[in-house]
RNA sequence: GGGUUGGUAGCUCAAUGGUAGAGCAGCGCCCUUUUAAGGCGUUGGUUGUGGGUUCGAGUCCCACCCAACCCA
């Protein structure tokens, strides 16, 4: 039995679907195309409502999302992403054929309306329909008009239903769209230009992560979806660009969780002749700009399902900048006087599981993650990290154990790293050889050759856009900021 | 990978091991300014899948699938 037969089976067994099919045929019998065509409007439903003026002749279109039937007159809501407007339909104003056609419409159908604006007794801005046009028949019932979609599976697998019926979900995605647009505007206003570099790479570089593999038939070669654009952006610095960014998808073939999606959006920005502190200034300015422009201010409130504020993030400048080692001394003043064994013992005493940590610096990093990062809600630039943690950044001139980087923590998560980029080709080669570790990862010789031609000293930042949007919109799962998150197939 | 919770009508949710139910949506009737419209009536179910225990399973047991959360 194939899928089409299954679908016929489902139809014949479901009364709701069958009734909508009957209405579809009834429209056709009346000479009305149920799947319409072009319809000129004077504005979207939400636009007309926002800029409402009485006595205007308007044309609009949208999905019917509510129907209040008063017998000889009807009120419907027409909605789209812009919002909604109420439409009043009355036998006195509308042709008999139009009223007959309206009988075959349902919540969910797309309708075009022409009429005059007025305000009802109850003060509702409305359109008195003079004519209507069926634009598309909906053959399946929409989710509950009041509760919307609650089932997380439906929300994620059928996002269109979530967007149609859950206002809060739509608002999160509208904010995401605004954030991405504003990031581009912010960087372009400061002279950065957007570039596009390969998403399919022969050697997946710029990060330590498992790549997705694919194959190019004509060239007969394996390719990888990029895990980072970094090495190509640096080639552009070699090529003479000085202020560039790329805002697009990365792919990592790793686990899926509340904070991880296999494809995620990353902003990487490089600025020739800048250093990590200048990049920290830039990211600080940018995030504050986004918060003020899109989120209504520098205090970001996260709320639970009941609408109570569970967390407030204060983005007021200047943001704290503290050295990695000083943060650990804040947790345990004698931390850097301890031997590696004493550090492990301290962790055991304080209930921090470090059995999986191989090296001593990993023990320290684990303490940092558990006792500092996860508890830091307001912005904190962690600077001068140990070089083992960051193999692609420049070493600190005064202390070779450290690198010139920041790690920006907000909302208990790392939001953005920023480096003074390594531009010494010999040290870079040595670090990459050390990092690539044998058979699976090949060295990107072309990248190293590019560095040998000379790359200007530069500052670089990466910002995980999904996590940034989570922080700014107050949602707890990355799936709530990605329109179509990856899911296991249903069966 | 391990643990916890969940999957019941199109949607939102009920149902001590004992007749599967409500609200919304739908359908029928009434109502010409309603807005979660209202009133009266009414249709709709392979309870995620497959086994098992039992006189009897949505409920208990086993396996599997999907999801959310926690842990690694």
Image: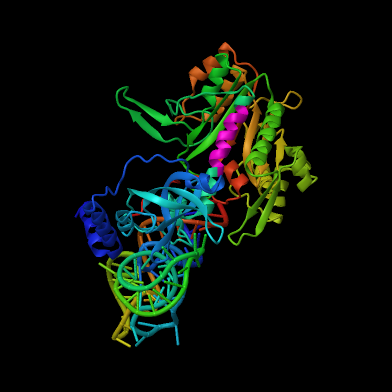
Query: Residue B25 versus residue A170: which sits nearer the camera?
Result: B25
Query: Residue A143 versus residue A302: which sits nearer the camera?
Result: A143
From the viewer's perspective, is residue A242 above or below residue A18? above
Left or right side of A353 for A151: left
Residue drawn at (72%, 28%), measured in percent from left and top? A277
**Magenta portion: prevailing SS class:** helix
Residues in magenta, as a range = A175-187
Q: Position of residue B34 (x, y in %)?
A: 50, 65
Left or right side of A342 for A149: left
Query: Residue A31 versus residue A247: which sits nearer the camera?
Result: A31
Residue A255 seen in render: no
From the viewer's perspective, is residue A81 above or below residue A438? below
Q: Image quadrant of residue A453?
A: top right
Q: Position of residue A3 (x, y in %)?
A: 24, 52
Q: Position of residue A177 (x, y in %)?
A: 53, 39
Residue drawn at (54%, 50%), measured in percent from left and top? A477
Residue drawn at (65%, 60%), measured in percent from left and top? A308
Left or right side of A408 for A198: left
- Asked if the stretch drawn in magenta spans residue A60, the answer is no
- Asked if the stretch drawn in magenta spans residue A183, the answer is yes
Q: Image quadrant of residue A245?
A: top right
Screen quadrant of the C terminus of chain A: bottom left
Residue that sits furthest to the top in the current view: A453
């Amino acid at each position: 039995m194939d899928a089409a037969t299954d679908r016929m089976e489902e139809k014949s067994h479901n009364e709701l679907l069958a009734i909508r099919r009957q209405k579809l045929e009834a429209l056709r019998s009346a000479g009305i195309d149920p799947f319409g065509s072009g319809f000129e409007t004077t504005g979207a439903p939400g636009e007309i409502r926002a800029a409402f003026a009485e006595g205007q002749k308007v044309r609009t279109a949208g999905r019917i999302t509510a129907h209040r039937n008063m017998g000889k007159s009807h009120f419907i809501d027409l909605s789209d992403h812009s919002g909604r407007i109420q439409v009043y339909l009355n036998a006195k104003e509308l042709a008999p054929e139009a009223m007959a056609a309206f009988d075959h419409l349902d919540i969910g159908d797309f309708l075009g309306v022409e009429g005059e604006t007025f305000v009802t007794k109850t003060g509702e801005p409305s359109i008195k329909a003079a004519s209507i046009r069926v634009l598309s028949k909906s053959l399946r019932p929409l989710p509950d008009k009041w509760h919307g979609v609650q089932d997380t599976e439906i929300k994620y697998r059928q996002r269109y239903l979530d967007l149609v019926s859950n206002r809060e979900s739509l608002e999160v995605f509208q904010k995401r769209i605004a954030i991405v647009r504003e990031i581009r505007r912010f960087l372009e206003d400061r002279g950065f230009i957007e570039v596009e570099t390969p998403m399919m790479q022969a050697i997946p570089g710029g990060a330590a992560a498992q790549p997705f593999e694919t194959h190019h038939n004509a060239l007969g070669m394996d390719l990888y979806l990029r895990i980072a654009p970094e090495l190509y952006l640096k080639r552009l610095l070699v090529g003479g660009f000085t202020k560039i960014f790329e805002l697009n998808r990365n792919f990592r073939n790793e686990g899926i969780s509340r904070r991880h999606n296999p494809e995620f959006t990353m902003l990487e920005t490089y600025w020739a002749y800048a250093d990590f502190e200048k990049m920290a200034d830039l990211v600080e300015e940018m995030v504050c700009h986004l918060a003020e422009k899109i989120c209504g201010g520098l205090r970001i409130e996260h709320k639970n399902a009941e609408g109570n504020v569970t967390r407030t993030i204060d983005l007021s400048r200047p943001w704290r900048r503290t050295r990695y080692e000083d943060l650990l001394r804040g947790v345990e003043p004698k931390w850097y006087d301890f031997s590696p064994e004493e550090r492990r013992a301290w962790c055991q005493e304080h209930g921090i599981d470090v059995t999986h940590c191989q090296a001593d610096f990993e023990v320290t990093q684990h303490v940092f993650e558990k006792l500092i990062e996860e508890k830091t809600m307001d912005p904190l630039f962690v600077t001068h990290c140990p070089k083992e943690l960051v193999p692609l950044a420049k070493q600190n001139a005064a202390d070779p154990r450290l690198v010139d980087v920041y790690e920006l923590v907000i909302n208990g998560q790392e939001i953005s790293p920023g480096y003074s980029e390594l531009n010494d080709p010999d040290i870079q080669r040595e670090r990459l050889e050390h990092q690539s570790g044998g058979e699976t990862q090949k060295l990107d010789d072309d990248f190293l050759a590019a560095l040998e031609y000379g790359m200007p000293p530069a500052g670089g930042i990466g910002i995980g856009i999904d996590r940034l949007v989570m922080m700014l919109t107050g949602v707890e799962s990355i799936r709530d900021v990605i329109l179509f998150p990856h899911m296991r197939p249903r069966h």
